[in-house]
């Protein structure tokens, strides 16, 4: 099962935000999107999440072009810059709402399990407006993972997290990789996850400047070195 | 069945938010009371006919709906929660109709209270038959008006300062509906129902339109 991004372009108000972005994300791999501010990382993630329609190009999942149909949306989990949480509901109420939307079985168990691994159990019954930035980020990550998505998209997920929470998140990402998920994470500081990454896609002004593959992690290795991790 | 389940989930979410925020019960009711109170003071020493009362009632209803819908959509846009709803497997129509039904239900209760306020402040005399017809017209008007307001508010939600633009874009669309509602209400309150059916037809036409039209636009207006 591979996720293919085929010639995705996006123009907003006459400005070319993305230009023919094309790469493949194999199963059980982590792809890091890197690049300067305005390179198009967030826009690409939003297109993959279904928040924005591409001007051109398509997303191919299991050899089918999926224009963000219901089946595709069911397998995608997205934690973006926006928390996507209702400020006046508690963390538990927010998560229960999204569990219902995604028809999650035994939602309370799932919320508790995620709460233990991500570390937001203590604030479950507080309204989101009263939570710290880090706690909000944890609940937002939990929201994106609640329905056990096959494709996980995260935009700067370490923002606002303390050292312990960052370590927890890295553990969660490792678990997701062990579960053969497709992970795409936009990061400025690629060193945090470069050792886990299968490929790092460098974006520059809406185009792919280059892709670095981690040797020994995939058959798709093209002999390039993983610069940030100092891979072999 | 799946669509009904999805609408029910969104409806439940709206009611839970209303319980917490009290947008309709608190903000909406206070605003409606304030408007009706001001109207009653302005027309205190004037003999008011039913046409004027109907006009004032629908002015109060229109602005209360705009206020409530604006606030409700603001809550959805905060943190891009609406985005989370749209990328979930739930149908966009379910999100729209869940919201419409929730707001309609809450506004229906508010409308009932507004009618009572008008009866008290403007000393309107109503019998059971007239009250029934009045409530029926109010419900039809509120359903059409709130749905159009939600649709337009969603359409302009991505525009900077959309909440300010809302009345400017919305009111011209509502003018025929408001005229029909004012005419129908004044005929009901005045007890002469000669042309009532004619006005009710136009109101029902608006209701039919608000059921069909969102289907044509929703897919486009919900993308960033």
Image: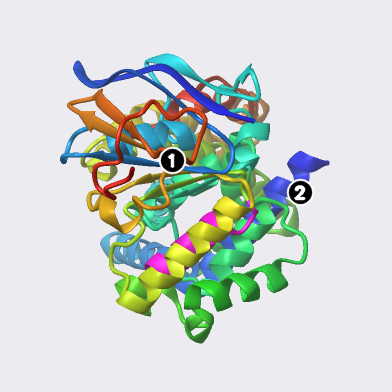
**Which residue is labeled 1 in the image?**
A198
Q: Are marks 1 and 2 in contact (CB under 8 Å)?
A: no
In front here: B21 or B52? B21
- The residue beneath circle 2 is B5
* Residue B218 seen in the figure: yes
- As helix, strand or loop, the secondary structure at mark 2 comes to helix
**Magenta segment:** A136-148
Q: Quadrant of the N terminus of chain B?
A: top right
Residue for point 31% across, 75% down: A163
Residue under the point 62% across and 23% down: B212
Q: Is residue A87 visible?
A: no
In the rendered image, residue B34, in percent from the top left (x then y), is placed at 34, 67
Does residue A40 appear to the left or right of B209 in the view shown?
left
Outermost residue toward the bottom in this view? A122
Work out whether B28 lies above or below A121: above
Left or right: A132 as drawn, with respect to A109: left
Residue at screen point 46% across, 33% down: A48
Residue A210 image point, x, y percent: 26, 26
Residue A144 on the magenta span: yes
Dominant SS type (magenta): helix
- Residue A202 percent location from the top left of the image: 26, 33
Relative vertical location of residue B108 with respect to residue B197 in this rendering, above or below: below
Farthest front residue in view: A232
Tell me if mark 1 has few (under 14), some (14-19) or many (20+) residues whose alpha carbon lies within 10 angstroms of its own. Answer: many
Mark-to-mark CA distance, 1 and 2 = 40 Å
Q: Nearer the viewer, residue B119 or B110?
A: B110
Residue A220 inside the magenta-drawn segment:
no
What is the chain letter for disc 1?
A
């Amino acid at each position: 099962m591979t996720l293919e991004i085929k010639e995705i372009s996006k123009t907003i108000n006459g400005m070319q935000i993305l230009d023919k972005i094309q790469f493949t994300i194999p199963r059980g791999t982590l792809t890091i999107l890197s690049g300067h501010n305005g390179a198009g990382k967030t826009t690409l993630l939003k297109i993959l999440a279904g928040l924005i329609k591409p001007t051109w190009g398509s997303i191919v999942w299991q050899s089918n072009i999926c224009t963000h149909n219901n089946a595709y949306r069911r397998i995608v989990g997205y934690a973006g810059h926006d928390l996507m949480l209702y400020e006046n509901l508690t963390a538990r109420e927010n998560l229960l709402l999204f569990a219902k939307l995604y028809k999650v079985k035994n939602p309370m168990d799932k919320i508790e399990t995620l709460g233990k691994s991500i570390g937001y159990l203590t604030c479950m019954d507080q309204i989101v407006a009263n939570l710290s930035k880090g706690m909000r980020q944890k609940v937002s990550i939990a929201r994106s993972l609640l329905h056990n998505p096959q494709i996980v998209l995260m935009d700067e997920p370490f923002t606002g997290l303390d050292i312990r929470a960052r370590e927890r998140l890295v553990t969660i990402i490792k678990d997701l990789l062990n579960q053969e998920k497709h992970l795409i994470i936009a990061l400025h500081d690629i060193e945090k996850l470069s050792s886990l990454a299968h490929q790092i896609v460098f974006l520059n002004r809406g185009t792919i400047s280059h892709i670095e593959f981690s040797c020994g992690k995939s058959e798709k290795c093209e002999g390039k070195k993983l610069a940030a991790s100092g891979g072999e | 069945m799946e669509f009904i389940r999805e609408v029910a989930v969104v409806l439940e979410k709206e009611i839970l938010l209303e319980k917490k925020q009290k947008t309709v019960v608190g903000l909406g009711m206070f605003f409606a009371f304030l408007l009706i109170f001001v109207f009653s003071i302005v027309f205190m020493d004037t003999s008011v006919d039913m046409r004027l009362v109907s006009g004032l009632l629908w002015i109060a209803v229109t602005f209360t709906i705009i206020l409530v819908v604006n606030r409700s959509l603001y809550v959805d846009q905060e943190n891009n929660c609406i985005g989370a709803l749209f990328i979930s497997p739930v149908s966009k129509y379910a999100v729209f109709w869940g919201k419409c039904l929730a707001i309609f239900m809450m506004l229906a209760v508010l409308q009932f209270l507004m009618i009572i306020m008008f009866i008290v402040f403007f000393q309107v005399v109503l019998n059971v038959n007239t009250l029934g017809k009045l409530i029926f017209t109010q419900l039809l008007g509120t359903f059409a008006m709130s749905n159009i307001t939600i649709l337009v508010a969603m359409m302009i939600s991505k525009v900077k300062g959309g909440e300010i633009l809302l009345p400017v874009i919305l009111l011209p669309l509502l003018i025929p509906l408001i005229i029909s509602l004012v005419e129908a209400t004044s005929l009901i309150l005045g007890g002469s129902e000669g042309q009532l059916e004619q006005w009710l037809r136009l109101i029902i036409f608006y209701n039919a339109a608000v059921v069909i039209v969102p289907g044509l636009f929703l897919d486009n207006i919900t993308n960033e």
